[in-house]
Image (tube, rainbow, N blue to C red):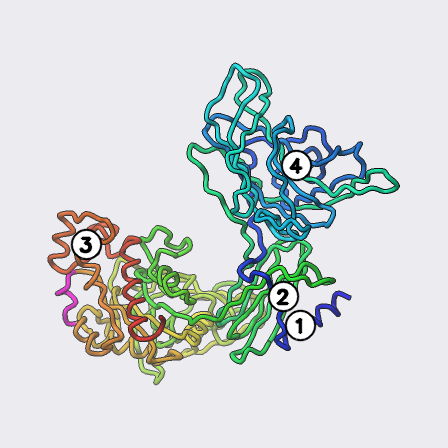
Amino acid sequence: MKKFTALILILLLILGVNPVFADSAEGYSENFDNGEIGEISIKNTGFYQTDFVGGIGAKSETDKSLALKRPETKEQSGSSIYTEMSLSLYKKYFKFELNFMPLTDDFSHVMFASNSHTPSSPKIYCSDDGYGAEYALNRGKWNKIVFVCENPSVDKTSQTYSAKVDVFVNGNQICNGQTFKFKKNSVGATTVFLRFAMFGKDKTENGAAVYPEFTVYLDDVDIKRYDEYPEIPLPENEPELDITFEGASARANLKNAVMVLAGYGADGALLSAEIAENDGNASLELKGEYASAKVFLFNSFESLTPIAMLGKKRMPTVACWGDSLTEGQGSSDFRNGGTKSYPGVLKTLTGYDVRNMGSAGETAMSIAARQGAVNALLEKDVTIPSDCTEVEIEFKGYNDDGTYAGTLTPRNKKDWNPCVINGVDGELSFKVDTTKNPRVLIWAKFKRKTPGEAVYAPKGTKIFMPNNIKINENADINVIFTGTNGVWNAEDKSGEDYADDLVILIRKMLAKTKNPDKYIIIGLTTRARDDWKITDAKMREAFGEHIVFPRDRIATTEVLTDNGITPTEQDIADIAVGRVPTSLRLAVNDVHYTDVGYAEIAKLVYAKMIELGYCE
């Protein structure tokens, strides 16, 4: 039955008959994080409950699937199921929040109450039960419920405590400043108890009450104290969907739900689809190139009631090639997310699929080899052993016509791996003498990924870097920021002195791209302006409107004041000679930038992309 229904669903997608969603902006996911539960105790006071976090018989305090089931007899449970929480009065506010999903039809409502049961908050029902109020819960979806209690004063001489209470459901305030009277556990105590109660729909059979079982899900239970009024969070109900030239992927947390990931061509026709049914974190992946993708969420295979839909078009891919100034060395999240590097900021500005292809310390020749403009060829014959032991190799850079291009000095394993030598998959390791200019490759070794037959690789065999080549072949736009560490061409000449060599190398890189006319070049930014005078002129002549010179912006007092930075004497001295001010660099003699410096470079590239019509 399930497979048959799934086939019908896929057929509907193929025909373009997509389900109608009441609010396509809503999705379905959850963020598991129960780390704050231990801050305040959650306990069971004897009422029957199972698998509830902190309750008697709970699996664990950080259980991720919290199914609460109401027993069928009043003797077991009373008229409701609730959890009682001990709340400290030491700060002005305390907040109780949770993600709450009513699932079965026998569920009725929830409410908050003091430990004496009165007073209580309004009853919070489900919208499909005919309660069309703005605070209605959505059955089968996550709802964010928040209870905030203000502590204006604490009377230590009384056993009761009066406080103002606000209650929010999915961002809507349903209870504003209602007075709650709590009973303290003793005179002079500084804690009170709050009850979060869940009710089922009571039924009768032959005049007798029947208390049916109902199921709800709870997660992200969070209880904290605050000095100021806390922020009120909204429900997180969005599935995640990514689409790049490699394919499409989707993630969601499913509770009795079905996820469908569909990939479409440029004409809107369905090319492929995958289906998942799960009660936990689920992910789907489609390999291949798609113009757009959609993720559909349904409550079950049987009914296919729509929960959410999210669609995305494949955005253009931007490859940013360079050294440490591209990788983002000096930024606050260097090699830990990379959102503060200039490619990371550019991704935020454009919404495009921006790939950071920077590798710290590399020369322009080595960058070109990673990109594919220069071929890394073996200098000597080598036999790759059958087992996974390392074998030493030698390689240098050559042009497509076989002429020698220059020395290659890889600096970071992550940027040269994986690699392939004569059909054998493996990885490179190497050691470089960084005390010399040009850098000297002391040794390089190759280690195959899996055992196999020994393979002979003669001199001149190419070292392929498939991941790098794939990105270069598929990038719609290329940004090149190279030359800071020198060119080091066939005669080991530095780009500092031989600007023509740098121009030639960049042109080789552009010739290897998918769109050779769709590119941006970033001019050199280190040292004083006059140090790169010849190079800047040659680059401007060669690349015209496609080049940006960051120094024109970031070597000014305006960039400092615009970012709330007061120029220092050193900054003023730097700017006077056309050098990027020290306040935007890690130190006086450092070439790497702060978050502000990288953000300004990203803004310049973004403005150039708009100017050239690469984005709006």
Residue under numbered circle 2: 260
Callout 3: SS:
loop
Distance of mark 1 from mark 2, alpha carbons?
9 Å
Residue where numbered disc 1 is placed: 10
Which image quadrant is residue 286 in?
Answer: bottom right
Mainly helix, strand or loop, the magenta region? helix
Q: CA distance from mark 1 to mark 4?
A: 41 Å
Q: Earlier in the sequence, mark 4 or mark 2?
A: 4
C-alpha gap between disc 3 and disc 4: 60 Å
Residue highlighted by disc 4: 197
Q: Secondary structure at mark 4?
A: strand
| Quarter-of-image position of residue 552 | bottom left
Mark nearer the N terminus (2 vs 3): 2
Residue type beneath disc 3: Pro
Question: Which percent across, then down, holds residue 442?
Answer: 34, 63
Check disc 4 and give the amino acid type: Ala
The spot of residue 435 in percent (x, y) is 26, 57
Quarter of the picture containing the N terminus is: bottom right
| Label 1 secondary element | helix
Q: Are marks 1 and 4 in contact (CB under 8 Å)?
A: no
Looking at the image, is mark 3 or mark 1 earlier in the sequence? 1
Q: List the single residue furthest toward the right.
A: 206
- Is tag 1's residue or tag 2's residue first in the polypeptide sequence? 1
Which of the pair 220/382 is nearer the observer? 220
Residues at badges 1 and 2 in contact (C-beta under 8 Å)? yes
Q: Residues within 10 Å of mark 4 (few under 14, many from 20)?
A: some
Q: Residues within 10 Å of mark 2 (few under 14, many from 20)?
A: many
Per the rendered image, the range of residues in magenta is: 528-534
Q: Amino acid at mark 2?
A: Val
Q: Is residue 205 left or right of residue 524?
A: right
